[in-house]
Image: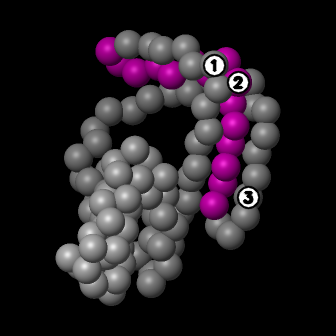
Amino acid sequence: MATFELYRRSTIGMCLTETLDEMVQNSTLSPDLAIQVLVQFDKSMTEALETQVKSKVSIKGHLHTYRFCDNVWTFILHDALFKSEECQENVGRVKIVACDSKLLSQ
């Protein structure tokens, strides 16, 4: 199964990884089980985004860099404006990583 590890670099993903590493080092958890937990984490995050996120956001900004590698797009925007139905927010610099969700289920 292809895993993109998109969510593992988020705050919650990093904390989960650190906790699992600590548990493996203390022999509380086997390395194989820790890997299974991380794979399940990726699946759960993907499913939650597909089923629970209902709002739409438009993004405008100055495209600084874009890249396409291994079926993953990476965009870096400067002076980005995020706009939803409820509010809008200016962000100085933002990195967007996107991939085809069909590839996550392979």
Please state which of the two labelled residues, at mark 1 or mark 3, is closer to the viewer: 1
| Label 2–label 3 contact, CB within 8 A | no
Residue identified by numbered label 1: 92
Residue 44: tell me if it is visible.
Answer: yes
Going by the numbered disc 1, the residue's amino acid type is Gly
Q: Please, is residue 93 above or below residue 8 in the view?
A: above
The reply to whether dot 1 and dot 2 touch (C-beta < 8 Å) is yes
- The crowd level at tag 3 (other Cα within 10 Å; few <14, some 14-19, many 20+) is few
Q: Nearer the viewer, residue 72 or 95?
A: 95
Q: Residue at x 27, y 73 (%)?
A: 26
> Residue 77: within the magenta?
yes
The magenta stretch spans which residues? 72-86
x 28%, y 38%: residue: 54
Q: Amino acid at mark 2?
A: His
Which residue is painted at 65% across and 67% down in the image? 71
Which residue was labeled with disc 2? 78
Which quadrant of the figure contains the C terminus?
Answer: bottom left
Q: Magenta span has 97? A: no
Residue 50 is at least partly visible in this image: no
Against 79, residue 105 (above or below) is: below
**Tag 2: Cα neighbours inside 10 Å, few (<14), some, or many (≥20)?**
some
Q: Earlier in the sequence, mark 2 or mark 3?
A: 3
Q: Name the residue beneath numbered marker 3.
A: 68
Q: x and y percent of residue 7 in the render?
A: 43, 55
Q: Main secondary structure of the magenta part?
A: strand
Q: How is the image coloured?
A: one colour
Q: Which dot marks residue 11? A: none
Q: N-terminal of the two: label 1 or label 2?
A: 2
Viewed as shown, does residue 12 lie left or right of 78? left
Kindly report the distance in space between the C-alpha atoms of the residues bearing marks 1 and 2: 6 Å
Q: Position of residue 87 (x, y in %)?
A: 38, 13
Instruction: Determine the secondary structure under disc 3.
Output: strand
